[in-house]
Amino acid sequence: MQESYIHIEFDQERTLQDQVKEHLVALILNGKLPATEPLPSSRRMAGMLKVSRNTIVLIYEQLVDAGYLISKPRCGYYVAPAFANPEMLLGDDAASDATPVQWQRRFCIRPGNERNIVKPNNWASFEYPFIYGQVQHEFFPIEQWRDCARKTLHERWSRHWIDDRVDTDDPMLIEQLRTRLLPRRGIYAEASEILVTIGTQNSLYLLANLLCRPGVKVGLEDPGFRDARNIFATFGADLHLQEVDDAGLVVDQRLEDCDYLYLTPSHQVPTGAVLSAARRKALLQMAEQHDTVLIEDDYDAEINMQDNPTPALKAMDRNSRVVYIGSMSKSISPGLRIGFMVADEELINEARSLRRLMYRHPPANNQRQLALFLSQGYYDAYLRKIRELYRSKLERMVQGVEHYLPGMLGGSVSSGATSLWLRAPNGIDSEALAWRAAKQSVLIEPGGIHFAGEQPPANYFRMGFSAIAAHKITPGIQTLAGCFE
Amino acid sequence: MQESYIHIEFDQERTLQDQVKEHLVALILNGKLPATEPLPSSRRMAGMLKVSRNTIVLIYEQLVDAGYLISKPRCGYYVAPAFANPEMLLGDDAASDATPVQWQRRFCIRPGNERNIVKPNNWASFEYPFIYGQVQHEFFPIEQWRDCARKTLHERWSRHWIDDRVDTDDPMLIEQLRTRLLPRRGIYAEASEILVTIGTQNSLYLLANLLCRPGVKVGLEDPGFRDARNIFATFGADLHLQEVDDAGLVVDQRLEDCDYLYLTPSHQVPTGAVLSAARRKALLQMAEQHDTVLIEDDYDAEINMQDNPTPALKAMDRNSRVVYIGSMSKSISPGLRIGFMVADEELINEARSLRRLMYRHPPANNQRQLALFLSQGYYDAYLRKIRELYRSKLERMVQGVEHYLPGMLGGSVSSGATSLWLRAPNGIDSEALAWRAAKQSVLIEPGGIHFAGEQPPANYFRMGFSAIAAHKITPGIQTLAGCFE
């Protein structure tokens, strides 16, 4: 009897209507409801599921409209003939005694063997999640984003995102990036010098794929952004690791033979140091003299809340020697995966061809939604709010660390960051500390992964504060301090 | 005087309110409205722009709510102090006499030099667009897709798409693919054997990146999918081109030393041939004996409207020797860029690590929206509709070709395709034909690009019918016939 299938464990996340409809659709498509019998009456179904009869009537009518059910007068609702037979095909599950594929021998690169930053995906269940790179959901401007989705998904605009764009981007988004975002960093670019990507890592991947092979020398910061190092290593580039101090990347003659230099001048990953004006100038001169291309990752520029922000390195670049990479991951949401790259048109053209091969273009609906989010002023209004929020969080962070973890704050605190880089006393192992802290529901990130050497210093750790609620910061640091004993 | 800035060329695509708001936000953010003077009154502004006063009142209030404006009693609206100074920074535009970067010497691969299928991006303005790979906007289930967007963008669900998912996919989408889509092709897979990608090309790119280098032999269909050939060539694989006939790829001993074989068994690209049952069996046996991995591109499986569809090759694969690739580009929209890959868990794990490097994960909002679109039954209801549509279009296509272009229909017509592959008489150059047709507003695709040889046959062409309206098909073919003279 079909009624035995009709049992639903409702969850709290969604409306009863959605869940009942989903269940009935699944039963129909899986062929669990015989076409020869009517469905239970709306009254009976409502009683079985303990939902209102109106809900059931509405769902039955929706399923008639969609073609799943037909209504026979005085008999009730039946599964429509078109859906009477499930479309499932039989698989061939006969056992096999053949030799399995030796995948390990076939892999030409081994990205799975790279060391990665590991973050618990249950971070939201921690009481004090000092995690980097995630955001507080409750501050996401969801109403405004929904408004942009609604407008984008209007018939009038559908042609902007339904079609295959082949290798082009949404011109409205390019215009917003060009006239709205980039000038804030002192960058004035033509549309042909901008390429939209699926986030900063994707920009780096395109560049490494295009420009690197064994024998090409790439300079990187140490400590630095682990994923960048893994990406350049994937294409066999010769890596040169250069140290970092309180004024950012150390600029000296060891960088002179680099073909490329990847750096995070606005807020060094992970230390937060800002590259000094003197070093910026020296770096650009050196790049010119030794034909080095600089890859500037300005990953959190948009939430920089300094009153007199330093322009991007790209703003000082007179000769298309700087490739600029930005993203919306820190300012809006990392889940949407939207980034961009600004560079010489010749490089952008070739990167566009590579992108066409790799995935054609970033999803067009998200491009248009973001363009609208910018043009309708939602983005800038939101930025003002979260900059305020991060400014006040940073104050609490610094005060808390100075009080409970005295002496651990290394160097200058960069005002635009969403994390602090801490140095525990020698002899403290931050991996062990992180485990002890986790037991107290405090999440911190051990810092060893950011160093290149085989024996990285064990006593550094990072505390992000973009995801933790402001009022949790001080008690979180206090609890962490208790884990040092 | 600021009022000189207030002039808008309205377009028909969007509401006046959106356009006025966008214009005012741009003026404020660009510092064009002095903070010392009030904005024109709503009455005056409405008169200047010739829109209703209510519209202006509403926009002013929205801009107050967003923090752009402040309202001073009895004085009017002013730009808020927080927005009084534009954030633009000055760039350094001094001229430079330094040597420019020699990009050409730096490129390690040259994707821009590959021959590509070129499609006019103004295809929608053709009267008879027989273009392949685009869809008719008016049939897109936009109301249902919007409903899914609205539900996804509810606060209750935001955590599913705001966060960085690192290397994971939306479990709800994986479940829908696993239990709803794949069984229709006879494929029963575990969640760990499925990876979501940014479309079919992205699946191929991940595979080629992971598995190919010089010395690795990849078999391809000739004629075949150009982008696949370009992707495998990018990683230096040795390509073997194998011919195709009415029963699909010719299976013989020349394929025996291939490490990989890329094929489109359900509907061969571009001929539409279906790989015969005998060849499928022979191919799987050969693959087993000679340790070949088969890469099955089932690109349009979902709109296959045969009554007894052939299961995927993957359904007969007893030993994880087939990598299955699918996408939603043909069935829903190519602009959304959603595809997936099903293979041995060991391969999927490594591909997932590579994807994590390449772009972390496909945008999470689109994953959830699609999952909902499937689970709420919108997808299957829509499929039934477009299958009917394509069935009737195919009939018109075949009738039109048989009547106006007799003898040009090559081999068997595959019922699941959205294009026909035509062979004009010898001596006809389909490139020249396409130009003549374009002048009559008929868009067809010359077929030479699909062949691998230096001197491809000139007389083949493809006519897609997914984007052209049904009633345009017959007159379009008639017009095309006139271009042969």
Image: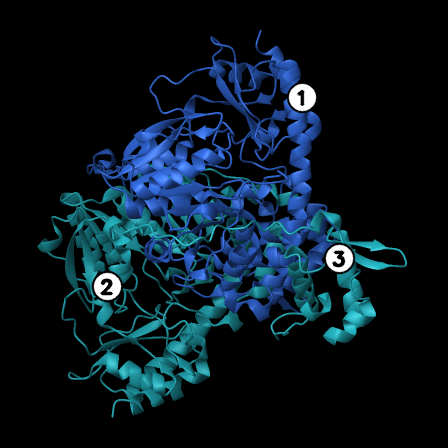
Chain colours: A blue, B cyan
The numbered mark at residue B224 is 2
The percent position of residue A22, horizontal first and vertical second, equals 59, 51
Residue B253 is left or right of residue A28, and the answer is: left
Above or below, comparing residue B483 to residue B451 in the picture: below
For marks 1 and 3, give the CA distance: 37 Å
Question: Which mark is first along the chain, 3 or 2?
Answer: 3
Residue A416 position within the rendered picture, expressed as x and y whole percent measured from the top left = 58, 35
Q: Residue at x 24, y 41 (%)?
A: A213
Chain ID, mark 1: A
Q: Which residue is mark 1?
A: A399
Above or below, comparing residue A461 to residue B143 in the picture? above
> Share a chain, discs 2 and 3?
yes
Helix, strand or loop at disc 3? helix
Mark 1, other Cα within 10 Å: few <14 / some 14–19 / many ≥20: some
- Disc 1 secondary structure class: helix
Are callouts 1 and 2 both on one chain?
no
Q: Amino acid at mark 2?
A: Gly
Looking at the rendered image, the quarter that the C terminus of chain A falls into is top right
Q: Give the x, y percent position of residue B446.
A: 27, 75
Number of numbered callouts drawn: 3
Give the image quarter of residue A259. top left
* Residue carrying label 3: B62
Chain letter of disc 2? B
